[in-house]
Image (spheres, rainbow, N blue to C red):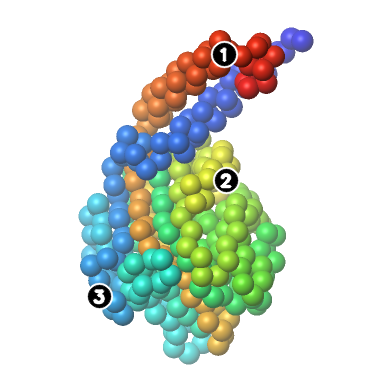
């Protein structure tokens, strides 16, 4: 069967893009792919029980070790919420965000970075301790009970280009989700959690292609999924909790790290190395097995 040249080119481009993201996922965590460290927040030096330190109103030049600000916006009355350093589950000296603020109020932890570029890696540990079950704000398709927690990334032009969310689905757990483009803000689950579990999440975002990949607990769970909007650079990462009045919402974060990833040529070098290794292994398999078995292995 013959395919039009345009169709074949499209397949080649898609395959090449997939290889770039596959290489990023396989090599994520190594210096060659993660590149320059932008921020590394682990709170290990902060005494237990102390508030998470901040740099506001001054912005700490990167590589940053301290978040910019912590606060909230109450809907009525004073803000009820704290962000303190605690040992939580398997997390040592984590940032524990705790609030019982409801309505349109929220508790937040914010960063300021102002980093040019289009490719970033983002990793963190999270422990969802307890959340309201219903009545949370921002109930959309994919989050019928609302969003208990969200992480938003903004470009240099203040455009939001990435959003992750914690979506409770019951009294003891829920899902981790990413937001699709469009005004509806629909969420797509990429994994699940139970309250009290620690999970590790890696994100590789390429603003030049408008795509990202996600690894949950060292397993690739989303590849080449769209970012929320086109933009470039990284200016701010906003962690915030929604709540229900009088109901506890507690989420712990630790080992938060951002890095500027090298441009695609560096990643493609990794792809070439991986491809050469794979080709060599395939040739050895062919020699050691019948042709039919080798074709099945392909």
Which image quadrant for residue 130?
bottom right
Toward the bottom, the furthest residue is 77
Quarter in which the C terminus is drawn? top right
Which mark's residue is nearer the viewer, 3 or 1?
Answer: 1
Q: Residue 89 has which mark?
A: none
Examine the rendered structure and indicate whether residue 22 appears above or below residue 238. Answer: above
Nearest to the observer: residue 255 or residue 103: 255
Q: Are marks 1 and 2 in contact (CB under 8 Å)?
A: no
Distance Cα–Cα, label 3 vs label 2: 35 Å
Distance from Cα at disc 3 to Cα at disc 1? 59 Å
In this view, the residue in front, 167 or 192, is: 192
Q: Which residue is mark 1?
A: 288
Q: Is residue 203 above or below residue 78?
A: above
Locate residue 41 relative to residue 23 in the image: left or right. Answer: left
- Would you name the residue on which mark 3 appears? 47
Classed neighbour count for the residue bearing mark 3: other residues with Cα under 10 Å, few (<14), some (14–19), many (≥20): few
SS of the residue at dot 3? loop
* Marks 1/2: CA–CA distance: 33 Å
Residue picked out by circle 2: 221
Residue 131's x, y, as percent? 56, 75
Query: Residue sitting at 55 percent across and 16 percent down?
Result: 285
Q: Which comes before the other along the chain, label 3 or label 1? A: 3
Is residue 269 in view from this perspective? yes
* Label 2 SS: strand
Vertical arrangement, residue 263 with respect to residue 230, above or below: above
Q: Position of residue 75 (x, y in %)?
A: 52, 82
């Amino acid at each position: 069967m013959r395919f039009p040249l345009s169709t074949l080119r499209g397949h080649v481009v898609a395959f090449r893009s997939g290889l770039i993201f596959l290489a990023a996922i396989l090599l994520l965590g190594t210096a060659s792919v993660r590149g320059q460290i932008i921020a590394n927040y682990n709170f290990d030096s902060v005494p237990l029980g102390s508030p998470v330190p901040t740099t506001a109103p001054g912005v700490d030049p990167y590589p940053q070790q301290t978040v910019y600000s912590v606060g909230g916006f109450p809907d009525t009355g004073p803000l009820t919420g704290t962000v303190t350093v605690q040992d939580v589950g398997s997390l040592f000296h984590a940032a524990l965000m705790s609030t019982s603020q409801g309505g349109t109020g929220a508790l937040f932890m914010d960063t300021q970075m102002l980093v040019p570029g289009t490719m970033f890696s983002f990793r963190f540990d999270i422990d969802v301790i307890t959340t309201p079950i219903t009545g949370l704000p921002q109930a959309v398709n994919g989050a019928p009970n609302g969003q208990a927690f969200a992480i938003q990334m903004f470009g240099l032009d203040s455009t939001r280009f990435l959003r992750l969310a914690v979506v409770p689905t019951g009294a003891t757990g829920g899902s981790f989700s990413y937001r699709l483009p469009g005004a509806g803000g629909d969420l797509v689950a990429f994994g699940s959690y139970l309250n009290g579990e620690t999970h590790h999440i890696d994100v590789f975002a390429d603003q030049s292609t408008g795509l990202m990949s996600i690894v949950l607990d060292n397993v690739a769970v989303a590849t080449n999924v769209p970012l929320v909007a086109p933009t470039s650079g990284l200016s701010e990462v906003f962690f915030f909790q929604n709540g229900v009045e009088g109901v506890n919402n507690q989420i712990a974060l630790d080992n938060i790290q951002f890095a500027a990833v090298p441009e695609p040529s560096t990643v493609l070098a990794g792809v070439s190395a991986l491809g050469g290794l794979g080709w060599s292994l395939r040739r050895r398999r062919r020699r050691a097995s019948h042709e039919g078995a080798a074709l099945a292995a392909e």
